[in-house]
Structures are given as C-alpha cells and as structure tokens.
Image (cartoon, rainbow, N blue to C red):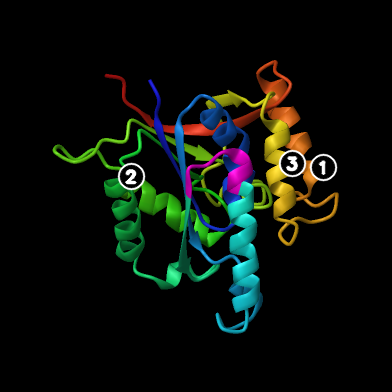
Amino acid sequence: MSNKVLVIAAHPDDEVLGCGGTMAKHAKNNDQVYTAILAEGITSRDKKRDRKRYINEIRDLALAAQKANDILGAASLQMFDFPDNRMDSYDRLDVVKAVEELISKLKPDIVYTHHAGDVNIDHRRIHEAVVTACRPIPGKHLVKRILFFETASSTEWMTPGSAPGFVPNWYVDITDTLQQKLDALHEYEYEMRDWPHARSIKALEYQARWRGANIGAEAAEAFILGRNIEN
C-alpha cells in the first residue's frame, strides 16, 4: 500500500539536506512525495528584506528547487514566500494556518520536517507549526507518522544546552538513493559551499556514510520520531 509523504522545509535545499535520500526511496517505492518550502532562502543576506532586489535570484532558486525535486521523484513542489530567516516576525498562528492548509489539502500519511533544536530560527518555527498542525484532533485527518530531520550547518551548530540535541532514533538506509541526493544537491549550486564547510557536497556524503555506519549500512539518513500511529 502506497503512502502520501509530505516534506515541509524552511528553505530551498533543506528538503534535500534533511531527507533527500529518503524522499527518493519513497518515490521508488511508489509513494507519492510532496514538498512544501515555506521561506524564500535569499533575502536575509541584507539587513532589511528587499524581495524586489532579489527577484531574479528567487526565481533561479525556485527553478533549482524544481530540478532537485524532479531528481528525487517528488510529485509536486509548492513554494511559499515567508521571509528568509525572519519567520519569527510572523505570528506563529499564521505559519500554523499555512501548514494546516497543506495537511488538509494533501492528507499525508507521513510528514518530515525540521528538528526543534536547530540554530536557524525558521527551522524552529516550522517545527513548532508542524507539531501544532499535526495534532491528532478527532474528526480531522490523522498524520500517522511525524519525523524530524537534521539539517547540515544548522542542527550541529546549536550549542549544547541551548536547545534539545539531535539524538536520532529512526534511520533510513539510502544506499541505493544516495547518488540521487547528491545529484539533487548539485542543482543547489548557489547554496552549496566548499569543503570543509558542513554544507559542502563532500561533507554531506560523509554525513550519509557516517549515519549509514551507525546502522551497519553504506549510507543512511537519521531522524527523530515525533509520533507513530499504527492501525
């Protein structure tokens, strides 16, 4: 039986960083994979948000996101325009409502999103919104599984004691889809950095290999299980 899978990420590239190999594996297993990216990913480079100044870059990033998600086999990609690294300037309810509409429309069985303890404020706000939007209210659509992923150059950069640490208890073997993840990351050339930055292609392959070694596999992605409901 196929599943509907929804990946809710903050910025273009976060979906691939966090669960790109898992997305490709779902698609290969004939699951329907949907991606939602809530924030722009560009405008925080200036002191004041100026969307018009970066309109070309935002367009190019959207095209890169579409190509990356095509490589992973996503059925659709929806991009919102919340401000980059400024989602704490919005009422939390506004973000929750956006996520609730996604849940109501797509009715996913499985949701992937950010870890609560990331250093990036957008990641934390989206985590909170997803947990709220996916609360199991009788009579509404029930998301059966919620998983939180790690995002290189954010999750591991949070200092100990400042937020919950990322301690995975759910792993997905991505030995067969690691190359798709790396190919998708290459589409995000503007977002990638040179080694030894944590968001370099080499570092991300090492991360996948290390997570694989955690479970005796060639490559893996690691998650924290938020909730799992078995019928």
- 3D distance between C-alphas at marks 3 and 1: 5 Å
Check contact, mark 1 vs mark 2: CB within 8 A.
no
Point out the residue furthest to the top here. Answer: 216
- What is the quadrant of the N terminus in the image? top left
Residue at the outermost left position: 139
Q: Where is residue 29 in the image (x, y as percent from the top left)?
A: 51, 24
Q: Are dots 3 and 1 in contact, CB under 8 Å?
A: yes
Q: What stretch is highlighted in magenta?
A: 69-76
Q: Is mark 2 on a helix, strand or loop?
A: helix
**Dot 2: within a 10 Å radius of its alpha carbon, few (fewer than 14), some, or many (20 or more) residues?**
few
Q: Is 75 a magenta residue?
A: yes
Type of the residue with mark 3: Leu
Amino acid at circle 1? Lys
Query: Pointer 1: residues within 10 angstroms few (<14), some, or many (20+)?
Result: some
Q: Which residue is drawn at 23% across and 39% down?
A: 141
Depth check, mark 2 against mark 3: the one in front is 2
- Report the disc number at residue 106: 2
Q: Classify residue 138 as left or right of residue 189.
A: left
Tell me which residue sits at (68%, 52%) in the image: 153
The residue pinned by badge 3 equals: 204
Q: How many labels does the image show?
A: 3
**Disc 1 on helix, strand or loop?**
helix
Residue 103 in sight from this viewpoint: yes
Q: How far apart are marks 1 and 2 (CA)?
A: 35 Å
Report the side of 211 relative to 95 (left or right). right
Reading the chain from its start, which is encountered first: label 1 or label 2? 2
Circle 2: residue type? Leu
What x and y, as percent, mark residue 10?
A: 52, 56
Q: Looking at the image, which is closer to me, 159 or 157? A: 157
Q: Mark 1 points at which residue?
A: 202
Mark sitting earlier along the chain (2/3): 2
Residue closest to the eye, 42 or 224: 42
